[in-house]
Image: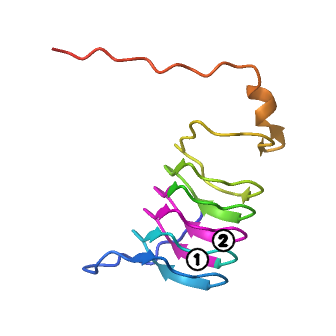
Amino acid sequence: MAGKKKGKRQGEAPLRFEHADLHGAELVDVNASGLSVDDARIAGASLHNVDLSKLVIDDAKLGGARLGNVALDRMRLRDASAVGAKFEDVDLSRASFSDATLRGARLDDVDLTDVRIDNARLDGLVINGVRIDKLLAGKPAKKKRKRKRKQ
């Protein structure tokens, strides 16, 4: 599936983009595993055959970005907007989304294994032609059970 690994970035400091403007950037055949992005503008960017596993994105704008054959496994997307983004042949396994906006995003041929979604608005969510918001309508949210600690 997605995100062919290009090899490890051995012995190098972790990559970090802060307050970066990558609007409209085109990244092809890049290994940026472990990249950290904070308050960046990535709207309209195009990424193809890129390893972004373990990516951490905080407060970034990814609107209209196009991602193809990208490894985003174990990604953490927090307080970020990917409105209208297109993800095609992308590995999102074990990814987590927190206060993220994916309104109008298109995910095609993605791996969502072990992805956790909590406290999400699912209005209009369609998976394989099935309206998920309609399936969940009227079902009460499960309450978290408190576990008893062993003493």
Residue 74 colored in magenta in the image: yes
Quadrant housing residue 102: bottom right
Quarter of the image with the N terminus is: bottom right
Q: Amino acid at mark 2?
A: Gly
Give the residue drawn at x 53%, y 73%.
Answer: 40
**Vertical order, 75 against 118 (above or below):** below
Q: Residue 126 location, x and y as percent? A: 79, 43
Spot the residue most to the left. 151
Q: Amino acid at mark 1?
A: Asn
In the picture, measured across the screen, residue 130 lies left or right of residue 22, that is right
Give the total of numbered labels. Answer: 2
Q: Residue 136 location, x and y as percent? A: 73, 27
Q: Residue 100 location, x and y as percent? A: 60, 52
Residue 67 colored in magenta in the image: yes
Q: Which residue is mark 2?
A: 68
Determine which of the numbered discs, if any, sits on residue 103 in the image.
Answer: none
Quadrant housing residue 6: bottom left
Mark 2 packing: few (<14 Cα in 10 Å), some, or many (20+)?
many
Q: Are marks 1 and 2 in contact (CB under 8 Å)?
A: yes
Quarter of the image with the C terminus is: top left
**Vertical order, 51 against 120 (above or below):** below
Q: Secondary structure at mark 1?
A: strand
**Vertical order, 129 against 37 (above or below):** above
Give the residue drawn at x 70%, y 57%.
Answer: 109
Q: Residue 12 location, x and y as percent? A: 28, 81
Q: Which residue is mark 1?
A: 49
The alpha-carbon separation of the residues under discs 1 and 2 comes to 7 Å
Mark 1 packing: few (<14 Cα in 10 Å), some, or many (20+)?
many
Mark positioned earlier in the residue sequence (1 or 2): 1
| Residue range highlighted in magenta | 47-76
